[in-house]
Image (cartoon, rainbow, N blue to C red):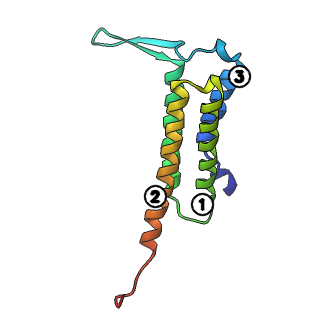
Amino acid sequence: MKMLTNFPLMAIALIIYNGAVFGLGGDALTWQTELFALGMVSGAVWDFSLGDLMITIGLLLLFVEILKATRVGKLSIVDHLLSTVVLIIFLVEFLLVSAASTSVFFALMLMTLIDVMAGFSVSIRSATRDVSLGDGL
């Protein structure tokens, strides 16, 4: 069960993106597809697209990942390494797969980069707090 908590959640965004793109026929999917529109009090219309939904999911996953980064323990290193692997997969796919060359995918990749940087930064910061030096040093 502990290993399940170390699963990098941004991999879920990667899986959802790839499932949507390759499951629906690649180029047939457009991230601009409107899911709903709401009339605002100002008179403007807010359009919510499939790409907006994907970015919203990514932001929610990033939030949980940053919360997970505050944990201290042996398995937190494994969590950071797995997040780094997910970032590498994002980068390789962005560069080599034409269906991944979209702004939505790029935003998800940036969220994964932030996840990796935040995870290592929080770990290093909390590790320096754990180190205590004697008064004579």
Circle 2 is placed at which residue position? Answer: 122
In the image: residue 18, left or right of residue 51: right
Quarter of the view holding residue 54: top right
Circle 3 is placed at which residue position? Answer: 22
Q: CA distance from mark 2 to mark 1?
A: 11 Å
Quarter of the view holding residue 80: bottom right
Q: Position of residue 45 (x, y in %)?
A: 37, 10
Q: Position of residue 137 (x, y in %)?
A: 36, 87
Disc 1 marks a residue whose amino acid type is Ile
Q: Few, some or many C-alpha atoms within 10 Å of disc 1 (few <14, some 14-19, many ≥20)?
A: some
Q: Residue at x 47, y 68 (%)?
A: 127
- Check residue 77 in the rendering and tell me which mark sits there, or answer none: 1
Q: Residue at x 64, y 33 (%)?
A: 93
Disc 2 marks a residue whose amino acid type is Val
Q: For this rendering, which residue is in front, 30 or 48?
A: 30
Question: Mark 3 or mark 1, which is nearer the start of the sequence?
Answer: 3
Q: For this rendering, which residue is in front, 28 or 12?
A: 28
Disc 3 marks a residue whose amino acid type is Phe
